[in-house]
Image (cartoon, rainbow, N blue to C red):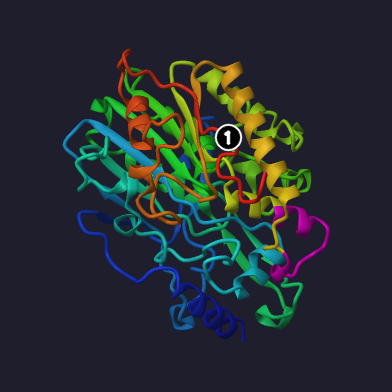
Amino acid sequence: MLKFNLAVLISMLLISFFPQAYAVGWEKIEIPDNVSTILDDDGRYKDIKTGCAFSHLPDEAGLPNKPFHFYYRKGTKAKTLIYFNGGGACWNGATCLTSLTVPVTQTTRPAYNPSIENENNPEELGGILDFTRADNPLKDWNMVFIPSCTGDAHLGSKNEVYVDPSGIINHGDAVLVQHRGFDNFMAVREWLKHRADRPGTEQVLVAGSSAGAYGALMNFPRLHSIYPDKTKISLLSDAGTGVFTSNFLNTVFEPDGPWGTEHTLATWIPGINRIGSYNALNFFTSLATGIERHFVNSKFAYVTTAWDDVQMLFLNIMRKTGQGVNDPNQWFNLTPVTAVEWSLRMLTTLHANALINRNSKYYISAGTYHIGLVDAFAPGVFYTEKSAGGIYLKDWVNRLVTDDRNYPLINLMCSGTCGAPFPP
């Protein structure tokens, strides 16, 4: 019964995301679905097991999940983009199970994407991954695309058992969800470590959108460590500004939390080393500035809209589920109070971050759309967005990866109400 119920619900849900297709010009790198042992930067060995949230279920379940794979596209320059895809997040029975019953529409969707196929194809996502566009500043770079299908922002290494509080999924009986995003990332990292062209890499851009923005930032130290000292390494974080609730932070970053982050975080790095002590108001500033100060020769760039509706939604979900509101239909009613709170906290965080560390810059655009680097929510936006100081987003990213004193990377922000979703 477990296999049937999950198969029907998830298959019907995910067929609506994007049509199935293989990436053109991209090589699919498949990772065997087994346990392997890797040596981490702290000198300790770790066992990792790749996979998606439900890829442990047998094939006959009919789920659109396969053993983990990622994508690689070889460019013509000794430069590499490593991109962590977004895919939402889940951390309790309501977000990991009940939310899967929510239809995919213009205004609603589940809290996370458990499929390795849907919304995880770099050819379909376009934007900064579109190497066919002449105006893409990274068109000639090597590109690595890391899918998100585990609901843990690329930070998990644990199998967790949940119960759907509504009793719909599996009739309220226990369901196992694989939070293996960190394991998937580490498998990609091992692949990168063994590439013959790695020692000659001149530049690396670690980037991520939405949930992938947190994976990019918090896994940045482990990517930085595998490249030579001469390699220039920067971070580009998109639509992930860390406006969370204390309840959420205490759930996912405390020992024995659902994602097993006590076994995955690079706790030898400042900022990450005290993550369990941060509260909701100082979390992202403390985390980011600690990492930035440690990697003082790297540039850190943050992109967001002033009224990002999906980031607002997740703040609302965190607050609602923390209050025991487990019905997803009650999560999507965003009030002006929530919108203003999210926007003010986001602005405070990014301003403080840039003030503390000179190697941190931001690009805050007008509007409510989610994600600027790829086309998942706003098609073409990477090439058309210019509401922050009249500078195109693509050109600002070009400044990030180009050392040109005439066009330095600077903080940019939209003017006025920045396209607020309600009357001023």
Residue visible at 74% across and 34% down? 281
Residue visible at 56% across and 80% down? 9
| Residue 65 location, quadrant | bottom left
In the image, is residue 104 above or below residue 207? below
User: Would residue 412 be counted in the magenta stretch?
Assistant: no
Categorize mark 1 by other alpha carbons within 10 Å: few (<14), some (14-19), many (20+): few
Decide if residue 269 is in sight here: no
| Residue 19 location, quadrant | bottom left
Q: Residue furthest front?
A: 423
Q: Please report the bounds of the magenta region as a residue range.
A: 316-330
Q: Is residue 30 left or right of residue 264?
A: left
In the image, is residue 219 above or below residue 85? above
Decide if residue 355 is in sight here: yes
Q: Is residue 23 left or right of residue 118?
A: left
Residue visible at 69% across and 36% down? 345
**Residue wearing tag 1:** 416
Where in the figure is residue 139, as x and y percent of width and height? 23, 40
Q: Is residue 359 left or right of residue 25?
A: right
